[in-house]
Image (cartoon, rainbow, N blue to C red):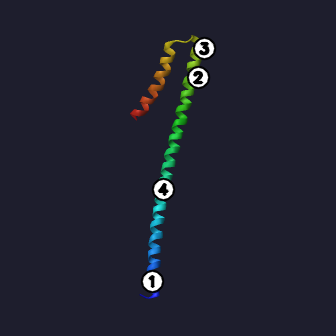
Amino acid sequence: MTDFAQMHIFFLVTTVTVAILGLLLAFIFFRIYQILTDVEHISHEFSEESKLMREDIADLRKNVREKGLKFKNLFDLYSLTLGRFKRKKRK
């Protein structure tokens, strides 16, 4: 085999390898982007839920100050929180 033919085979194999690795790397970056997007969505949902929980606890504290500690206040907090989670599961 001549040196010229060996050179062409080498460059052909190298080009195919680089192309395959480039496609593989692009796919990996795409999947990482999808995962980060999902993490951002989950973080946003968690932030909204924690805000609602703070509001519920503030309402409970206000009711305890005004009316005293009653089982109904704790039950209302529990039902609001549990009801919110059940509503989201139905969607």
Which of the pair 85/10 is nearer the observer?
Answer: 10
* Count of numbered marks: 4
Judged by depth in the image, the label closer to the viewer, 2 or 4, is: 4
Disc 3 and disc 4 in contact, CB within 8 angstroms: no
- In the rendered image, which residue does mark 1 sit on? 6
Label 2 crowd (10 A; few <14 / some 14-19 / many >=20)? few
**Residue type pointed to by label 4:** Phe
Instruction: Tell whether 47 sits left or right of 85.
Output: right
The residue under the point 45% across, 30% down is 85
Disc 2 and disc 1 in contact, CB within 8 angstroms: no
If you read the primary sequence from the N terminus, does the residue marked by circle 4 or circle 1 appear first? Answer: 1
Q: Position of residue 25 (x, y in %)?
A: 49, 61
Which quadrant of the figure has residue 57?
top right
Tell me the SS state at disc 4.
Answer: helix
**Residue type pointed to by label 2:** Ala
Picture layout, residue 11 above or below residue 32: below
Judged by depth in the image, the label closer to the viewer, 2 or 1, is: 1
- In the rendered image, which residue does mark 4 sit on? 30
The residue under the point 59% across, 12% down is 66
Disc 2 and disc 3 in contact, CB within 8 angstroms: no
If you read the primary sequence from the N terminus, does the residue marked by circle 2 or circle 3 appear first? Answer: 2
